[in-house]
Image (tube, rainbow, N blue to C red):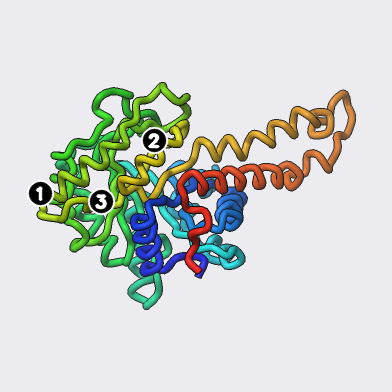
Amino acid sequence: MPIATPEVYNEMLDRAKAGKFAYPAINVTSTQTLHAALRGFAEAESDGIVQISTGGAEFLGGQYSKEMVLGSVALAEFAHIVAEKYPVTVALHTDHCPKDKLDGYVRPLLAVSEERVKAGGNPLFQSHMWDGSAETLADNLSIAQELLARAAAAKIILEVEITPTGGEEDGVSHEINDNLYTTVEDAIRTVEALGLGEKGRYLLAASFGNVHGVYKPGNVVLRPELLKELNEGVAAKYGQPAGSKPFNFVFHGGSGSTAEEIATALENGVVKMNLDTDTQYAFTRPVADHMFRNYDGVLKVDGEVGSKKTYDPRTWGKLAEASMAKRVTEACGNLRSTGTKIK
């Protein structure tokens, strides 16, 4: 069961929350980066999540037409086949989708899964993300209600981002300022709109100073302890026992986070952490090294013919896959998911 069924995906998330660990959610943009993610999970004996952003989907759709739905469906179908060879369970997810791309990405993908479920099968993707952080909270939650109803009917989990994450991700950008912190009032309004699971399960990307992209430790003020305040505020509002964790949180913009910040986030209900910047670098670094070391082989310098063995994409591609897989395995260790795979 390498690609999780809806029931197994729910089990994965429940196990993570109870065990205070999280799954690395690895952005992929090709069959090779998909293999790297799967290999990293397998070597860590960890289940995990692979995800495709709108930009990643455009890239997968080919530069001739850049069709997001075509690209993401093709890679998802490929994943359903090749994941059979890996001894771990993975979920397929679509990453950040803003309002202006819903009709060209998430809504058509929901329709694909709706047809599959009507025919007695499982959805193609196990979860989709709606990024309404650029909208007012009222508009954000109104759209989330519509998407959650459709997702639940198709046995899919919805991820929502209710307040901004700083930096830039596939064309959606927010300033790094004091608005990057979700309030208890924001969390309560979210529950008022989306419920506590009775309307469909959802993951919550709350903001605690997160920033997408590259930054050094200390340049961004993360407050993962804020997640505890959000859980406590909602639990108190809805009469849940002390210590309850109503939310399944997602950690966005984690590049450069300290071990202590990650540990605090895990203690407070984070079950999924996105990785893109770090794995992109891990994939590209050995390719750059290969090109610099073998410039006279990958290029036909001074009228020479170069060396096929050095410019063959398989030569440097293997190095890229191994490096990215290693970074995924490292992420599993940081998020405490190593050795937790479903038997």
Q: In terms of secondary structure, where does tag 3 sit?
A: loop
Dot label at residue 261: 2
Residue kind at label 1, given as amino acid type: Lys
The residue depicted at 41 percent of the width and 45 percent of the height is 273
Asked if the residue under mark 2 is in contact with the one under mark 1, i.e. CB atoms within 8 Å, the reply is no
Say if residue 147 shows up in the picture.
yes
Q: In screen coordinates, is 230 left or right of 14?
A: left
Q: Position of residue 282 (x, y in %)?
A: 60, 38
The residue depicted at 59 percent of the width and 63 percent of the height is 86
Q: Nearer the viewer, residue 127 or 178?
A: 178
Q: In screen coordinates, is 23 left or right of 166?
A: right
Q: In terms of secondary structure, where does tag 1 sit?
A: helix
Residue kind at label 3, given as amino acid type: Phe
Kindly report which numbered mark, 3 or 2, lies closer to the viewer in this rendering: 2
Q: Nearer the viewer, residue 77 or 263?
A: 263
Q: Position of residue 125 (x, y in %)?
A: 41, 60
Residue kind at label 2, given as amino acid type: Glu
Measured in 3D between alpha carbons, the distance from the residue under mark 1 to the one under mark 2, in whole angstroms, is: 27 Å
Q: Position of residue 212 (x, y in %)?
A: 41, 33
Q: Quadrant of residue 239?
A: bottom left
Mark 1 Cα within 10 Å, few/some/many (few <14, many 20+)?
Answer: few
Closer to the chain start, of discs 1 and 2, is 1
Q: Quadrant of residue 85?
A: bottom right
Q: Residue furthest front?
A: 242
Measured in 3D between alpha carbons, the distance from the residue under mark 3 to the one under mark 1, in whole angstroms, is: 14 Å
Asked if the residue under mark 2 is in contact with the one under mark 3, i.e. CB atoms within 8 Å, the reply is no
Dot label at residue 247: 3
Q: In screen coordinates, is 93 left or right of 178?
A: right
Dot label at residue 219: none
Report which residue position mark 1 lands on: 237
Q: In screen coordinates, is 230 left or right of 18?
A: left
The residue depicted at 12 percent of the width and 48 percent of the height is 236
